[in-house]
Image: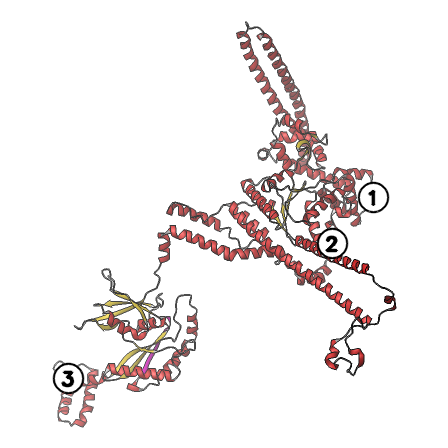
Amino acid sequence: MHQSKHLLRTLATSSTSHRTAVVRAAASVGRRRHFADSASAEIVSTNDEVKQNAQEEREAWLWVDSVFPVRLGRWDIRSYIGYAREETLLSRLRSLLSRVKSHDFQVVSVEPHGKDGGVFVKFKYNAKEDESALQALLHDLRQTVHSHGGVPSWCGLPTGEVWLVKGKPWREDLNRYASPMVKVAFEGPDVPEESLYGLLRPYGVISDISPPSPAPAGMLRSVTVNFHRLRSATTARNAIHAAPVPASPSGQVTILRTSYQQPISAHVIRDYVTSHPRLFLPVLLFLLGTVTYTIFDPIRVLMVEGKMEDWFDYKQYAIYQWIRTNAFDRFSFSTKDSDTVTLASEGVWKERQDAEEALHKYLTDLPNTICFVHGPQGSGKTRMLSGLLKQQGRKAMVIDVGELSKAGSDSALVSGLANQTGYWPVFSFLNSVNNLIDLASVGVIGQKAGLSSSLNDQLKQILDVVGRGLSRVNVSHRSQRQRLAEQAQRKELKSKEDEALREQIEQGIWHDGRIDAICGNGVMSELGVGIEHFSEKDADVPRHALAQVESTDEKERGIIEEQKQTEEAKQKQQRAEDSQNIESMPVVIIKNFDSKGGGARKEELLNVLSQWAASLAEGQVAHVIVVSDNRENVKRLARALPSKPLNQISLSDADNTSAISFVKQKLHDAGVDVNFSQHELAYIARLGGRASDLESLIHKVRSGMTVQEAVDDIVIRGVSELRKNAFGDDIEDAKSLPWTREQAWILMKQLSKQPEISYHEVLMDFPFKGDETPLRNMEHAELISIGTVNGRPSTIKPGKPVYKYVFAQLVQDPTFQATQDIAFNEKVIAAAEATVRACEEELIALKDVDAATASWWGSQRVVEMRAHHLLRKMRAAQTKVEDLGRQNEQLKKVLARAKARKEPSRGSSWIGW
């Protein structure tokens, strides 16, 4: 307190020169401690003067745009380029702005705002008049920046500008990205549109300003400003945010709050789709169909063509073949398989030559029908087709119906067919999704959307694209063969020209024009007469030619002969072109065309394949060959192609002589002794002419087995397979078979004794009783073979030649025979007893009839005749019951003895153990 009084006395008596130092001392004391409320007025006025001098140093903000890329969304990768150059760009910008020295301009901080592509610059300056000083500083800053190459930019193009921030910077990092539309909210009264336009127009061209809309309670009224450029919107949003603007002449101030407004509101598309499904779903279907037809279908056609041309098979490339020839094959000890030679080509199977010739004729003619090749399994259908196609150099597309029928679902079937035909890309899973969409659309709009398609439609769509791919293959092959023919024709013409030139040189009448270009020609040439142009008149005529004088008749004959040769050449060329067109056609092979098993899904597949094969044949797109194990399947193809007969080729087993010749030839090629005895030839004859069994025999003999052992092994394996396939593993398995065990047993028992039996006798007798279905099913299973006469079933034979001995081996098994005979006899006994009961009931009824009609004339005679017939029928049935009963007792004794033989063996083995 004493110190303050001392300062006041000194201030009052001191001179003006010392007053400033004293004031500073007083201010220093004031910073150390507070003045009391009783301070004098002179001290207070002095402090106010100090504060007024301190306000001359001011702070403000600048906005520099286009330093970084404006981020348009999360996916915008340009922002990473800006992050990589951020330090360099900020350093260059600071040094560039620091060149300005007016009003003591000083950069305080540089804060990047990369989301909007700019930088906030905080600076200090000294000025008494704020507005004029800021405008002067902005002018100097822009002039300095432009004179030194412009604002530093992330892309190297100085397109940025310096702007004065009129509000407060807001460096937010929300997921609100820049947009040409800026929403300006009014915190206070509404700002007139003219004032708002004048405030925002310096930042860029404005397309539109929407009027203020009514806002809910608690919300600010706002307008939307549409800028022409995104850069103008970002600059305006960062320059005027939180800026105070006079709203009325009365002096009311409004704070502007800015934010970006996205051109499309969130979920607007989803809301429109859910609100208008009747409009959107048809448009979606149209767009999906357009995309599929314009984008995916051409790709699929190209992939089908690549499948036919082996574009994706690495084994067809020259580099692989060279490596295999020079590396793999040299270190491999395997030999080439001689079994690839067809039997007909070796001349050991005469019957097969007719089938190969018929197939060859079909492949060398324009396709107008389908070729149906049928024969039992193992008859050599696949071998014959592959050998003939390899011989002609034809490529084929193979569709295996047997593999497709194993598919467990519709999508698996579609994928399998697409894989076999080269159809790609395939979106089989989308059909399940489309089914769910259809179910949902039923609940939303009351009807299906139509996105899902049936299995029939999907198969037709795939095969339609495959047909177009085959057409392209046909055209490309034809063009390729035409180019080769033209090259050959040009080569032949060149050879003829060379031959004519050679003859002219030999006769001395050829003239080289290149010499004329150097030495000139004519009689004045220095090289003499050898340079002049020679003609046939100038040539030396041979002496023998002088004696030949052609007459007029000879010349006419020569002209006629020349015309005839020209005509023949044209015809020959036309035939060659037709042959090339036929050979350029692709070949489609449909294997295992059989309706056995598979259910409704396989039926749809066979129907679609039949119609597609008929369209290919009628359109002459490809040669279609359908391979089946049963001739009954030709009916489906005949319905698909009713206007033209099918080209049917039947394959059968070879005769005994051809089969033995085939076995001898193969074993001789393998280095095995082929001098068979009569006993061995008899064993080979048991296999018949079935190619698969003969090949199995050859393989077993080559591995060291004798002929007898090999045949016995084939028969034993056939017994095991037949017991499983014909009778089932157990009773439950037998119930799933399309025939009964009794029906299979009676056929095998009869066929083991006779090579063939009558079809109608078997059909009329027990256990078939006129039902043909079990016989047809057993034929499809290759257990039996039904022969025809004039198109009607006539005889029943074993399904394979070796089955005759398999049946005999099966019947000779005592235990199995007794079991099956007992089961068969029980069924016959049950049927006979039912007959007896029916006769008894009818006889009782006849007794009543006789009593009621005793007075009628002749009625007693009729009743007696009917009664005698029923009694004979009962006697036959009862006799059958008694005979079969005694037979069953004997068979049960056989089973008991078999059981007794097994029990001691079990006991002895247990004791030994």
Question: Which x, y percent locates residue 96?
Answer: 37, 83
Q: Residue at x 62, y 34 (%)?
A: 776
Q: Position of residue 617 (x, y in %)?
A: 61, 47
Residue 190 sits above or below residue 662 on the image? below
Label 2, label 3: how many angstroms apart (C-alpha)?
119 Å
Question: From which residue to which does the magenta span run?
Answer: 106-115
Query: Residue 594, relative to residue 747: is it above or below?
Result: below
Q: CA distance from mark 1 to mark 3?
A: 142 Å
Q: Quadrant of the N terminus?
A: bottom left
Query: Nearer the N terminus, badge 1 or badge 3?
Result: 3
Q: Which residue is mark 3?
A: 44
**Mark 1 highlights which residue?**
675
Residue that label 2 marks: 336
Residue extending farthest to the top is 855
Q: Are marks 1 and 3 in contact (CB under 8 Å)?
A: no
Front disc: 2 or 3: 2
Q: Splitting the image into 4 quarters, where does residue 818 fall?
A: top right
**For the residue carrying disc 3, how many other residues have a C-alpha within 10 Å: few (<14), some (14-19), or many (20+)?**
few
Is residue 111 found inside the magenta-colored segment of the image?
yes
Q: Is residue 431 left or right of residue 837?
A: left
For the view shown, which residue lies furthest in the front direction? 552
**Could you tell me the amino acid type at mark 2?**
Lys
Measuring from the top left, give residue 585's x and y in whole percent: 64, 53
Instruction: Classify mark 3: helix, strand or loop.
Output: helix
Q: Is residue 411 visible?
A: no
- Asked if residue 696 is positioned above or below residue 775 in the image, the reply reads below
Q: Could you tell whether 46 is left or right of 280 in the image? A: left
Q: Which comes before the other along the chain, label 1 or label 2? A: 2
- Calculate the distance from the C-alpha at mark 1 to the C-alpha at mark 2: 25 Å
State if disc 3 and disc 2 touch (CB < 8 Å). Answer: no
- For badge 3, the amino acid type reads Val
